[in-house]
């Protein structure tokens, strides 16, 4: 187990193109908040020790109402404000990359949540839905590595949430809506896909697996499924 | 009767005090009795909510083994426990204790009033809350069991019986919440009207203690935000019972409508709970550091700004809900901005200690416990508030850790700050300081053992509301952390026995409390402990200055009560 003091080490191994961007934002927030934590606790600890009650010593009468006094905390507050805006300025392009600007894709999978499974429709070799070679898989996604993949998320009953921890991707699947997401895997492997939204008694344990294949293996998998 | 004397305080007091058990202890209109009733109900619910949490933690550490006294629970029971733990802790513990009990007890006493302006409405409010409690309790025992769609009750899961198997449990859940909202609406109207109209002579708005300000801002937030949720709850009940389709997509409804209505209320609600707790801490810090609070007016404005901002952050609960992703960054900006007023208040708390004369009596320990834990919870909120980071963190245990560092801090560290500080005033007895220290340190340690590892579990990808972490490959090697967290939770529950013992010993044989045991300035300490019916004798307090005049240079004492006339203050007249 990694150290409890290094939170970044606890993130699962990243396997998507934009995962590193999200990890970057998490890292920046981590270092910023650790700095503030240390500052606050250092000041607090120092004051508690230095100004503990001792006989014969009286507290100072400082009301902190005048600007000259208030500036001691208005300046840190201004720094908080600047850091806040800076985090959002850094975060906006990452959000846009993951959720708004989708790259063109060759492969689209239709993923439909239902209590308590993911139905995955693969369009087959022709790449088009509604044709005879569409094929449905249960709790199983197969994609090639290093290719952007589009996911069309739906739900049959309640809200589910499509979560790929290793890809830093999460998106709710809402009945009545069709929500599009995307990812591009950077390394082959098998990745767990838990449902992240309470969806009923089978929520715990509702999961699928994403199989990322090297291109040659993916082609072989397609040939084996659509002989 | 009591109603008229309270509304016309010039009338003498003792002759009109009601007598007899039923009028004085049960159907009383005295704000102090009503406060105790809220406190008793809140503490009883805290026990239920805590035991539910204990059972949940047991299941998470040792899945599908028999829980002591309860036996093995299935995933549907687990979902019910998750739902009821959240609902109970927010609506039936935090609200009645922080607002119901302390708002009722403190507002009249701190503004120099003899009672609330509408004492009968006040009694109706607590009895409506008792009815809400009865309905919520009954929901455990109906066929199908209690609600299990999460404390947020997202439809369609909550909207159709077949998705959870819960029928009347969830209808009663909605009914109980509606009654609870009605109760706190009556309370809020009372708080605001009382503070606006019954302040003692000389008590200007900017001489009110901060906790009164924060109770009022909390009441205002509740009044302004609860309407949409009541509308949403009515639609949910109609969907469930009459087959309407407000949230049913197959008939043209939209599940996201509920999320908007729920969180438009739900985020201000977080501050409804937080602000009174901040208020308790802001009362205790100056008393035990013998110093004026740092920047009183600035804190008032920071509170108002935070309250106003809380109405435009709700969609940060919905970044990945399927709403238009272009909405996320604007809400991320407002969300992260709300850290600014709270940063101000936290820094002001720390600055209040600077050059103080700090004593570590139990109320101060709890206040410092709140401050330190709230700093951690506030900082982890930045992760959740950032939309791109939230893509990963949303609905993981990181969120669970975050809101326990904020809300557990508010309800328990903040709540115990209030209890240890005002217990002498409420009950006329001192709590034992040794047991108080023990209770504090056990709670602080066990709290961190319980919730600190949940940050790591969340970062490792553990999602919320799963009944069995061992079903996930990634979590199997981390199960040790879930076990540690559970031991912390068991310790946390056991530690509260120290508090119970302290209260029992104190009420039976505790030292009698003087009127002002902490040498504090605010008006409640000028009344006897406990204050009699209508709070003061013939003479009501008159206010001459602000609430935090500690260690004034040149004065003999290091405190100066708000009601002491300037001639006797040892300072030139007109000092504020």
Image: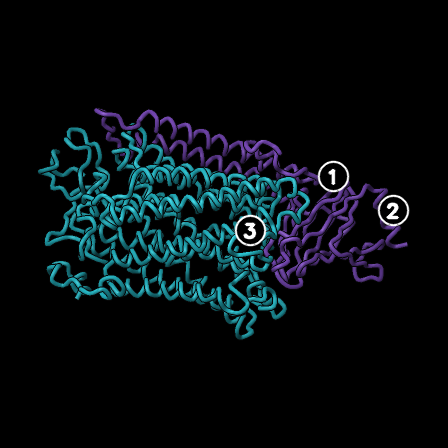
Q: Is residue B550 above or below residue B514?
A: above
Please give the letter of the chain rendered in purple.
A
Which residue was labeled with disc 2?
A220
| Image quarter of residue B42 | bottom left
Provide the secondary structure element on which disc 3 rests.
helix
Indicate which label's residue lies in the foreground, 1 or 2.
2
Residue A43 visible to the viewer = yes
Image quarter of the C terminus of chain B: top left
| Image quarter of residue B240 | bottom right
From the viewer's side, name the closer residue of B97 and B251.
B97
**Residue located 20% across and 65% down the image:** B20
**Distance Cα–Cα, label 2 vs label 3:** 42 Å
Residue B198: give its label: none
Which residue was labeled with disc 3?
B327
Provide the secondary structure element on which disc 1 rests.
loop
**Distance Cα–Cα, label 1 vs label 2:** 19 Å
Colour that chain B carries in the picture? cyan
Indicate which label's residue lies in the foreground, 2 or 3.
2
């Amino acid at each position: 187990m990694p150290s409890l003091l290094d939170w970044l080490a606890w993130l699962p191994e990243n396997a998507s193109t934009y995962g590193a961007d999200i990890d970057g934002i998490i890292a920046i927030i981590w270092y910023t908040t650790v700095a503030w934590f240390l500052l606050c606790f250092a000041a607090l600890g120092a004051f508690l020790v230095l100004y503990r009650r001792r006989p014969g010593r009286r507290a100072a009468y400082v009301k902190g109402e005048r600007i000259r006094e208030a500036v001691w905390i208005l300046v840190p507050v201004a720094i908080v404000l600047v850091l806040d805006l800076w985090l959002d300025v850094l975060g906006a392009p990452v959000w846009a990359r993951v959720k708004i600007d989708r790259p063109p894709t060759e492969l689209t999978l239709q993923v439909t949540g239902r209590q308590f499974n993911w139905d995955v429709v693969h369009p087959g070799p022709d790449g088009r839905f509604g044709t005879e070679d569409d094929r449905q898989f249960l709790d199983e996604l197969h994609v090639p590595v290093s290719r952007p993949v589009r996911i069309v998320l739906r739900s049959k009953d309640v809200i589910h949430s499509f979560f790929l921890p290793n890809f830093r991707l999460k998106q709710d699947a809402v009945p009545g809506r069709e929500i599009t997401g995307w990812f591009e895997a950077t390394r082959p492997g098998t990745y767990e896909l838990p449902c992240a939204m309470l969806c009923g008694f089978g929520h715990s344990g509702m999961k699928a697996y994403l199989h990322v294949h090297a291109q040659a293996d993916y082609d072989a998998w397609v040939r084996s499924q659509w002989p | 009767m009591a109603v008229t004397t309270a509304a016309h305080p010039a009338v003498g007091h003792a002759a009109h005090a009601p007598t007899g058990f039923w009028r004085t202890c049960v159907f009383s209109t005295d704000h102090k009795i009503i406060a105790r009733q809220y406190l008793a109900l809140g503490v009883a619910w805290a026990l239920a909510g805590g035991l539910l949490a204990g059972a949940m933690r047991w299941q998470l550490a040792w899945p599908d083994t028999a829980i002591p006294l309860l036996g093995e629970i299935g995933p549907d029971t687990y979902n019910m426990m998750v739902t009821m733990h959240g609902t109970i802790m927010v609506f039936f513990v935090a609200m009645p204790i922080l607002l119901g009990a302390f708002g009722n007890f403190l507002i009249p006493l701190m503004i120099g009033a003899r009672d609330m302006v509408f004492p009968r409405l006040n009694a109706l409010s607590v009895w409506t809350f008792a009815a809400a409690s009865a309905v919520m309790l009954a929901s455990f025992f109906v066929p199908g069991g209690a609600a299990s769609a999460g404390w947020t009750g997202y439809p369609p899961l909550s909207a159709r019986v077949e998705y959870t198997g819960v029928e009347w449990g969830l209808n009663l859940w909605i009914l109980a919440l509606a009654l609870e909202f009605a109760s706190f609406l009556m309370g809020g109207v009372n708080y605001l009207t009382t503070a606006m109209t019954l302040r003692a002579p000389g008590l200007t708005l900017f001489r009110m203690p901060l906790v009164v300000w924060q109770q009022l801002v909390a009441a205002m937030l509740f009044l302004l935000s609860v309407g949409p949720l009541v509308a949403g709850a009515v639609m949910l009940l109609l969907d469930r019972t009459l087959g309407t389709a407000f949230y049913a997509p197959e008939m043209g409804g939209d599940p996201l409508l509920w999320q908007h209505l729920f969180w438009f209320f739900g985020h201000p609600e977080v501050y409804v709970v937080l602000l009174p707790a901040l208020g308790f801490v802001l009362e205790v810090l100056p008393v035990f550091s013998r110093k004026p609070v740092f920047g009183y007016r600035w804190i008032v404005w920071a509170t108002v700004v935070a309250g106003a901002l809380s109405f435009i952050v709700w969609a940060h609960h919905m970044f990945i809900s399927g709403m238009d992703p272009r909405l996320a960054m604007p809400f991320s900006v407002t969300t992260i901005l709300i850290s600014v007023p709270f940063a101000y208040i936290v820094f002001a708390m720390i600055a209040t200690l600077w050059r103080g004369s700090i004593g570590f009596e139990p109320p101060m320990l709890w206040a410092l416990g709140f401050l330190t834990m709230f700093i951690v919870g506030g900082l982890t909120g930045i992760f959740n508030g950032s939309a791109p980071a939230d893509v990963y963190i949303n609905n993981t245990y990181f969120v669970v850790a975050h809101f326990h560092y904020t809300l557990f801090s508010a309800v328990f560290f903040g709540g115990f700050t209030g209890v240890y500080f005002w217990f002498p005033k409420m009950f006329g007895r001192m709590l034992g300081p040794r047991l108080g220290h023990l209770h504090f340190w056990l709670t602080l340690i066990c709290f961190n053992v319980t919730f600190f590892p949940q940050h790591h579990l969340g970062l490792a990808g553990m999602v919320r509301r799963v009944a069995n972490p061992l079903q996930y490959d990634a979590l199997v090697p981390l199960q040790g952390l879930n076990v540690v967290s559970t031991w912390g939770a068991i310790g946390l529950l056991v530690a509260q026995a120290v508090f119970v013992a302290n209260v029992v010993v104190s009420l039976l044989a505790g030292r009698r409390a003087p009127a002002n045991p902490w040498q504090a300035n605010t008006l409640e300490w000028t009344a006897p402990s406990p204050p009699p019916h209508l709070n003061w004798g013939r003479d009501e307090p008159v206010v001459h200055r602000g609430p935090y005049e500690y260690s004034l240079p040149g004065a003999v004492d290091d405190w100066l009560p708000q009601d002491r006339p300037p001639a006797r203050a040892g300072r030139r007249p007109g000092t504020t």
